[in-house]
Image: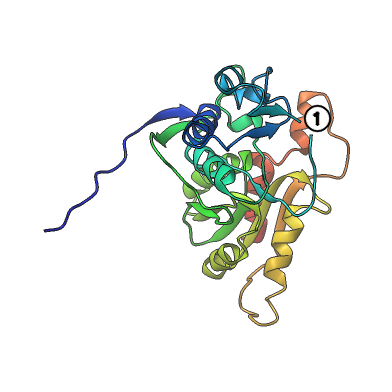
């Protein structure tokens, strides 16, 4: 007789609450776990990412501090389930892990509405491996490699282009270090076309690294790309203060759609 394990129950949480739950669960079961970060203590974490934890675990385990060091692992969730799973993995990892999140995915009521920032999250233990990308939407015509809030912009554009018969694959990197280069290459091998979206400056960033990953294997696999890759990022200019100007430089839906149509 085969015994099938019952599926884990879920309920809908915002990304910020999913992060807090992961930290709380790991600290409750392991007293050696402590949490360091910018404004994570009395302030409750930037965008409610550690709300209530200082009161529960005290200043010896919830510690305010600023750090920027090379050699750390870096994770960037785009949705509530990954927010919890990557937080759990980051806490359990013996190496230092930088956990980056965009305010636009946190599901806070005073932020602009993002319909995917509240979603199903497993109640118990939930682990997402560091260094593994996720196919957020399978497709066959073009690959869009992206992360964080830009995943949601890319999915919106993919839904729109599907009405025109364009099948867009959206690859959510989830982790920056280590970068899942093989997942990028596997996706591009299926589609033959690549657009990279990153809400960071165009120069010296993730978008260039992803494109280099693909282009460097073209010599060995000349049929890999059917068109030159496109990058959608922030121009190398200071971010404008005015909303209209800010939106003009950010990699939002209109610029993503233009890039996809260009590689097609």
The residue lying at 70 percent from left, 81 percent from top is 219
Q: Residue furthest right?
A: 237
- Give percent across and percent down for residue 19: 54, 32
Q: Residue furthest left?
A: 1
Q: Note whether 41 is above or below 205 in the view shown.
A: above
Quarter occupied by residue 51? top right
- Element at badge 1? helix
Comparing 67 with 232, the one in front is: 67
Q: Note whether 29 is above or below 195 in the view shown.
A: above
Q: Please give left or right for residue 62 compared with residue 235 in the image.
A: left
Q: Note whether 105 is above or below 167 in the view shown.
A: above
- Give percent across and percent down for residue 72: 72, 51
Q: Residues within 10 Å of mark 1 (few under 14, many from 20)?
A: few
Q: Residue furthest bottom?
A: 220
Coloring scheme of the render?
rainbow
Q: Please give left or right for residue 37 compared with residue 93 in the image.
A: right
Write down the residue under mark 1: 245
Number of marks in the rendered image: 1
The residue lying at 70 percent from left, 47 percent from top is 198
The residue lying at 77 percent from left, 35 percent from top is 248
Which image quarter is the C terminus in?
bottom right
Q: Please give left or right for residue 122 compared with residue 164 in the image.
A: left
- Give percent across and percent down for residue 130: 57, 52
């Amino acid at each position: 007789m085969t015994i099938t394990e019952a599926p884990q129950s879920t309920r809908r949480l915002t990304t910020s609450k999913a992060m807090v739950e992961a930290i709380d669960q790991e600290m409750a079961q392991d007293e050696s776990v402590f949490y360091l970060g910018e404004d994570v203590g009395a302030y409750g974490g930037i965008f409610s990412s550690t709300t209530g934890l200082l009161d529960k675990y005290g200043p010896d385990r919830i510690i305010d501090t600023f750090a920027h060091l090379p050699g750390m692992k870096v994770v960037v969730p785009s949705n509530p389930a990954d927010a919890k799973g990557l937080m759990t993995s980051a806490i359990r990892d013996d190496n230092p892990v930088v956990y980056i999140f965009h305010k636009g995915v946190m599901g806070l009521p005073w932020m602009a509405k993002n319909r995917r920032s509240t979603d199903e999250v497993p109640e118990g233990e939930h682990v997402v491996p560091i260094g593994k990308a996720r196919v957020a939407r399978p497709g066959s015509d073009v690959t869009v490699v992206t992360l964080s809030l830009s995943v949601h912009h890319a999915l919106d554009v993919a839904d729109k282009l599907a009405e025109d018969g364009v099948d867009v694959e959206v690859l959510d990197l989830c982790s920056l270090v280590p970068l899942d280069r093989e997942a990028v290459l596997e996706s591009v091998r299926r589609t033959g076309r690549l657009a990279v979206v990153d809400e960071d400056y165009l120069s010296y960033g993730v978008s260039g690294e992803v494109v280099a990953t693909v282009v460097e294997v073209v010599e060995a696999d000349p049929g890999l790309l059917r068109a030159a890759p496109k990058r959608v990022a922030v121009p190398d200019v200071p971010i404008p203060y005015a909303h209209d100007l800010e939106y003009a430089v950010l990699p939002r839906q209109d610029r993503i759609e233009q890039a996809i149509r260009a590689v097609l």
